[in-house]
Image (tube, rainbow, N blue to C red):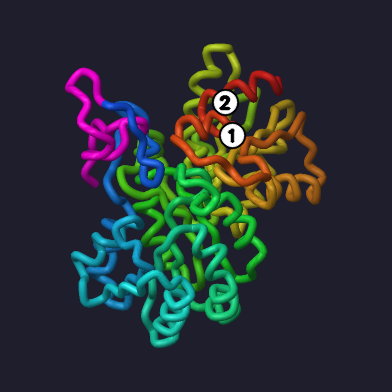
Amino acid sequence: MKRSKYTRPAWLGEQGEGGQGTADKPRLTTSAMIASLAGPDQRTAPAPFGHALAKLAEERPEIVGLTADLGKYTDLHIFAQKHPERFYQMGMAEQLLISAAAGMAREGFQPFATTYAVFAARRAYDFICMAIAEENLDVKIVCALPGLTTGYGPSHQATEDIAIFRGLPNMTILDPCDAHEIAQAVPAIADHKGPVYMRLLRGNVPLVLDEYGYTFELGKAKTIRDGNDVLIISTGLMTMRALEAADALRQDKIDVSVLHVPTIKPLDTETILREAGKGGRLVVVAENHTVVGGLGEAVAGLLLRSGTVPKAFRQVGLPDEFLDAGALPTLHDRYGISTNAMVRSIREWL
């Protein structure tokens, strides 16, 4: 995978956006829709989902790609360029997108359907339920802008998508952390026969987990780093933030363990119970999702049912409210999911 040593900071916006500025004083802007989540000088990889799917399709002729007028913004345009005869542009019609994907799956194809997470969860839920999940069809629903990854406000912020799909039988749910994991998750979900909902980070996606020798396995949680004082159970981009918080807290002689949980359903109960059962540690669940109905409540319910009682249990997640529009760095700090906000919270809880 080609890697970039530098990516524009999110607050500078996308290339060619936000005015001219000068060489030494660029105009400070943000792209609320597709701003990169990578920090200054953080390694990134471009469009990992699109490249991984296009490569996989070279050896799997049954793979087809469908989108609801969002090929560029879900990185499916890369698949379309490589395999134009297997790409279907359904227009701004999410219910049609899902129905067509279901029909193709019945005919032996393996559809990868992309849209924004809010549109899949809110506009197309009944079609996903009745046409795909109930029939246990082999459709992969891959959705960009999960949680608070856009500044366009409640119409585009899918803060409750995991809660919605967790209650749907037969549905496997993934929230990958970075480009390294997305690239590995694509062939893994293709090997899995049945419906999958995968949250997608798109564009220039940070590279983090490759530095830890991480390998994705569907349904498995893995300890990225160990520590004796705090256990952070995290998913999605919050694993990146958890690792950054662990480095910052080390300066305070606070030893932090990070358990990455990319598969929300089915949950790796054995690994979570084993790690949470190690006595004396504060257990913190961190997710880019509302605190209602996501990984935090899934873990809390698991611990209660098993009789596992940690030293203390806390959640880092989005509040149960409609969030503001604005620049992502500001919003992440305001709603408690930035690295600095997580560090402040853990210090207070200890």
With 47 as the anchor, is 104 left or right in this view?
A: right
Residue 83's disc number: none
Q: Position of residue 165 (x, y in %)?
A: 60, 62
Q: Would you say residue 242 is visible in this rendering?
A: no
Secondary element at tag 2? helix
In the rendered image, which residue does mark 1 sit on? 335
Q: Mark 2 near mark 1, Cβ–Cβ under 8 Å?
A: yes
Residue 241 located left or right of residue 336:
left
> Helix or strand or loop: what does disc 1 sit on?
loop
Image coords of residue 55 (percent x, y): 24, 62
Q: Quadrant of residue 178?
A: top left
**Residue beneath the point at 73% across and 45% down:** 300
2 or 1: tag closer to the N-terminus: 1
The amino acid type found where label 2 is placed reads Ala
Q: In 3D space, how far apart are the residues under numbered discs 2 and 1 (Cα atoms)?
A: 8 Å
Q: Quadrant of the C terminus?
A: top right
Give the residue type at disc 1: Tyr
- Chain part drawn in magenta: 1-26
Q: Left or right of 174: which side holds 273?
A: right
Query: Residue placed at 36% from the left, 50% from the top?
Result: 202
Please state the horizontal and vertical placement of residue 258, each as a whole percent of the image: 55, 34
- Between 328 and 199, the one nearer to me in the picture: 328
Q: Nearer the viewer, residue 58 or 39?
A: 39
Residue 276 x/y as whole percent: 69, 38
- On the image, numbered disc 2 is attached to which residue? 341
